[in-house]
Amino acid sequence: MEPTQKFKKNGAEALIYLEDGFVIKERIEKRYRIREIDQKIRRLRTSLEANLIAEVRRHGVNAPVIIDVDKDNFKIKMSFIEGIRIKEYFYTSKNDEIKKICLKIGEAIGRMHSAGIVHGDLTTSNMIFKDGEVYFIDFGLGFFSKRIEDFGTDLKLLKEALQSTHFKILKICWDNILKGYKKEYKEADKVIEKVKEIEKRARYAQKQE
């Protein structure tokens, strides 16, 4: 069975492939690092990513099921989500459906942040649409945090991804994501203000260049 979403066969951080119907994510060696340090970092990142995925699921966010974690070989074995990436789904969807999906995306991110989890790479390429639900994948850059700044950066990266990939429906997407986000996260207004602050800092930095 061929996956309907694209896999990074050889990404910057990991190899991702199907094996017996399961997804295997194997963090690759960084030869510029001292070997012992590299192994320690890969082991920690492997463990952290698996913990993040398990934790978001416990808080009601759709994500792969962790089957096994082999820290010594830097591998995570997880369920394969058979669906279509939100990135492609948006290209063929009507506005009413996009609004519903974005509301769900915002709610899920709100639950993540309520649980103190930063995804780290929120793009529509890392969201899978299956049976009317949105699943989040690739927590390789994620981490645990309680800082509003970190949550603001998480949302800001998503907004930038929407601007570059879904510019024509940006307002529909962003407005409904924020609507869902506010529904699930009690500190949402502070995070949204932080997003605006980060944007202002970025514009100021550009003017100084």
Image (tube, rainbow, N blue to C red):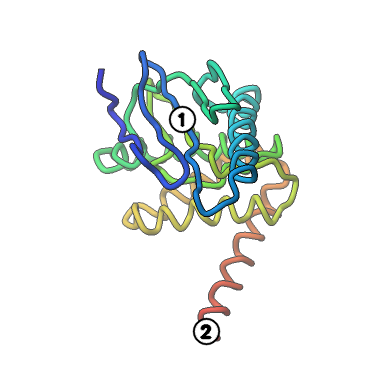
**Amino acid at the residue labelled 2:** Lys
Instruction: Identify the residue shown where x is 57% and y is 23%.
Output: 70
Between 5 and 72, the residue placed more toward the observer is: 72
Where does label 1 land, which residue? Answer: 25
Q: Residue at x 56, y 34 (%)?
A: 108
Position of the N terminus, as image quadrant, is top left
* Residue 185 position by quadrant: top right
Residue 207: mark in rendering: 2
| Number of numbered markers | 2
Q: Is residue 152 depicted above or below 181 in this figure? A: below
Q: CA distance from mark 2 to mark 1?
A: 41 Å
Q: Residue, x 36% and y 58% (percent of image)? A: 164
Specify which label sits upstream in the sequence, 2 or 1. Answer: 1
CB contact under 8 Å: marks 2 and 1: no
Q: Is residue 77 above or below residue 198?
A: above
Image position of 34 (left or right of 90): right
